[in-house]
Image (cartoon, grey):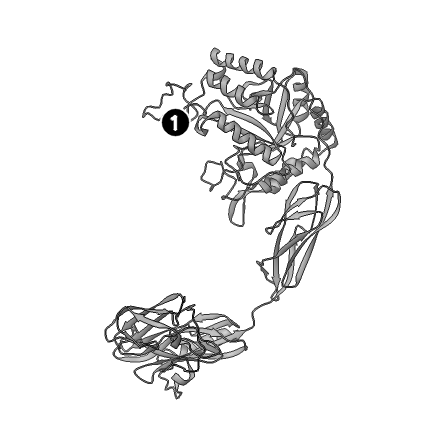
Amino acid sequence: MTFKHKLARRLAISRKFRMVPVLLLLAACSDQATAPDAGAPQSSVVTAVVPANVTIQTNQQIRFHDPTRYGRLDGSTLTWKASGGSITADGLFSATAPGTYKVVGHGRGRGRTDTSTVTVVLPPSNVVGIQVAPGTASLDAGTSHTFAATALLADGTSAPVGVTWVATGGSIDAGGVYQAGSTTGAFTVVAKWVDGPLADTAQVSITQPPTLTQVIVKPTSYTLATGSAKQFRAYGRNSLGDSVAVQVNFTATGGTITSGGLYTAGTNSGNYRVIASASGLADTAALTLSAPALAPAPTTPSGSGLPFGMSQQFSRFGSLAPPMTMTADGVTAATLIPRINAARAGGYTLIVNMTGDKHAAYMSTIDGVLQFDESKWRAQMETFNTATIRQAVAQAVADGTIVGTSVMDEPYVSGGADGGGNTWGPKGTMTKARVDTLCGVVKQMFPTLAVGVAHQHDKFEPTKSYYVCDFIIDQYDWRRGDVSAFRDAGLAMAARDHHAVMFGINILDGGVQDKDGTYSCDGPGQGGKGTYPPNCRMTPQQVRDWGLLLGKAGCGLYMWRADDQFMANSANVQSLRDLAAGLGAAPKKACYRS
């Protein structure tokens, strides 16, 4: 049995109805002085009224003061007011009636006011003991703890009571707030009843707090491309061996680093360092910066102009649906090369989603929280890391068959497991810095491949930037407001952050919503019922007009999936032909960073 357990047991056995005469002049040993100290230094600013909260009995006097200075009281420097009872010019308060009162101390000159709450109770009857809670306390030197006292009555119940406090090893105010001193050891806190000799004692153990012995920075080493970014983090380890949070100062060579540890590499290759320091301790992470492989100049694959097309055409239609020139589909390591060969033979282009699939495929419960599991994502990407696939991708990028790849869809979605699977975990799980890391993984594997992410420009950390990802897929629907304003805002962000943008439209759910009480989607701007109320499909005119406006502004036009019903409508097919003509005549652009 440990010392603390033995002590607690002895106290539990001996304290409950203890009647202890205290043969001490308590007022002389505590801060319960009844007259001001004329020699106290003067202060013109009130920082706090002591005690901040206190329980006393009717007609019990309590002395209020400014915090002690040099072990002496500064009550005489304050002007006092009370909401009831009476208070003297030097802070001596009492009340004849029970109730809750406010005592306000105001400093001289421009001093601030502070307020204490006083609870006044009637003297309890049939008191057989005083009990202090907690009975034991273990404190670090210099820290504080609040003790409370109650009266134990003959019928076994308890009642509030007025007491005076005295302590060793530190100081205690009239409200029971104990401030541990700097000396370690075993000490006591005593509460004495104001109407008799009854008292109780709590045992206090003061120890030295653990000290910081080590600063640790993570990751310990990292390789990244010049001009890209990496988030570093640091924590401490104390003399007890525990990992603790610590405020560090980050410094770095070869680039810049924020106070939060976000490192941005410079333009020169080489070996550099990130240093985290605190309290005279430091740790260093090794950095290797290398120049990224230059993306090839954009070439024109089969056909010319800007690519456009729907996602999931192979899974929904079995092949590319004319007159579209691009499809975005999930691929596996086994299907990627056959898909490249089919696209090259068919004269169309690809957005290859190597880490496609439902969000649930990349989720795990980590530290008790369902969230994005980067190790699952990396494991999927690693299946593509073969010499044969790397060479096939490089060739397809060079001849323009592959437009790019998306590492993630809608990184801003968040919530619990009951969100229908459309979640990456709690809000803040995904950040632009983390998505940049995913883009960096793909760029290291396929240096010439344009790597992007799908989200509206204004829905995911719009004040922050990508430093590695090449492009975003920025999807528009009617709910986003004016289409020209949406386009301009997306282009402005792309220019600010030096990435490309491929705009998109949501064909099945992006028309004017139907909120008139009858979900029919047959009104103006509505092309039929969408996937779920109140969404409606886009009309053929919206597909054509919005598609041309947005597609020409970016490096292509991405369209969220359609279905057989959409493709069976001749007006819809004509809108696709109009897009093919307009985008096919536009100058081709690459989806790389500028």
- Residue lying at 49% horizontally and 72% vertically, measured from the top left: 138
Please count the marks in the image: 1
Q: Which of 336 and 501 is in front in this view?
A: 501
Q: Where is residue 207 in the image (x, y as percent from the top left)?
A: 54, 73
Q: In the rendered image, is residue 381 in sight?
A: yes
* Residue receiving disc 1: 534
Question: Within the image, what quadrant is residue 23 found in?
Answer: bottom left
User: Residue 139's spot in the image, x, y percent?
Assistant: 50, 71
- Residue 321, can we see it? no
Front residue of this view, candidates 534 and 31: 31
Q: Quadrant of the C terminus?
A: top right
Q: Return the residue nearer the eye: 357 or 119.
A: 119
**Which residue appears farthest toward the bottom when viewing the image?**
23
Q: Is residue 35 left or right of residue 259?
A: left
Callout 1 crowding tier (Cα within 10 Å): few <14, some 14–19, many ≥20:
some
Instruction: Name the quadrant containing residue 201.
Output: bottom left
Left or right of 218? Residue 33 is left
Residue 263 point in image, percent of width and height: 65, 47
Q: Mark 1: which secondary structure?
A: loop
What percent of the width, then of the height, locates residue 56? 31, 75
Residue 82 against residue 330 in the figure, above or below = below
Using residue 172 as the reference point, say whether residue 366 is left or right of it.
right
Residue at the outermost right position: 270
Q: What residue type is labelled 1?
A: Pro
Q: Which residue lies furthest to the left in this view?
A: 97
